[in-house]
Amino acid sequence: MELHNIQPAKGSTHSDKRIGRGQGSGFGGTSTRGHKGAKSRSGYSRKVGFQGGQMPLQRLVPKFGFKNINRVEYKGVNLGSLQAVADKYETTTIDKALLVKAGLVSKNDLVKILGNGEITSKLEVKANAFSKSAKEAIEKLSGTTEIL
């Protein structure tokens, strides 16, 4: 093995253009960086979003709205869905585990029962929250609601 036979390991280089290896390579001299200016010097890095002095997009577009960091996000389940789950699994007790099994919510969701739809049987429902109409509809059929 001689110095002129040495090659980099296969896959270690990503470009055939060997920059800064003398005039014979065609990429010597300024090494494709042009003459003078910050971009020609080592250590230069452009700021993220820099648009050549034009006002960057993230400063141009106005801020909008408000995100409440204390917001509690519930997954809504309607009464009609509860009745379908009760009929499918032939049970009167509906809790979060059953709703997860039925595929209506995921295990990390907080569940809120909403009043859309009809229930026809007495149900014992356990959830994180209830709407007023859902609670009334469940208790009208002498069912029970329990907040987890």
Image (tube, rainbow, N blue to C red):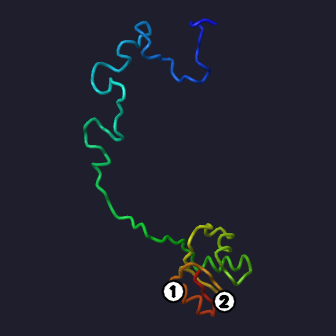
Label placed on residue 133:
1
Q: Which image quarter: residue 44?
A: top left
Q: Nearer the viewer, residue 26 or 46?
A: 46
* Depth check, front residue: 61 or 23: 23
Q: Amino acid at mark 2?
A: Lys
Q: Quadrant of the N terminus?
A: top right
Q: Position of residue 86 (x, y in %)?
A: 69, 80
Which amino acid is tagged 1? Ser
Q: Position of residue 22 (x, y in %)?
A: 42, 9
- Residue 110 locus on image (x, y percent): 56, 72
- The image quarter containing residue 48 is top left
Tag 2's secondary structure? loop
Between 16 and 115, the one lying in front of the other is 16
Label 1 CA crowd tier, 10 Å (few <14, some 14–19, many 20+): some
Q: Residues within 10 Å of mark 2 (few under 14, many from 20)?
A: some
The residue under the point 42% across, 15% down is 20
The mark that comes first in sequence, 1 or 2, is 2
User: Is residue 27 positioned above or below 96 on the image?
Assistant: above
* Distance (Cα) linking label 1 and label 2: 16 Å
Q: Please name the residue shown 52% across and 72% down the image.
A: 74
Image quadrant assignment for residue 82: bottom right
User: Up-down: is 27 above or below 56?
Assistant: above
Residue visible at 35% across and 16% down? 30
Residue 81 coordinates in the image, percent (x, y):
62, 76
SS at badge 1: helix
Label 2 belongs to which residue?
122
Task: Give the residue at the far right of this rendering.
Answer: 90
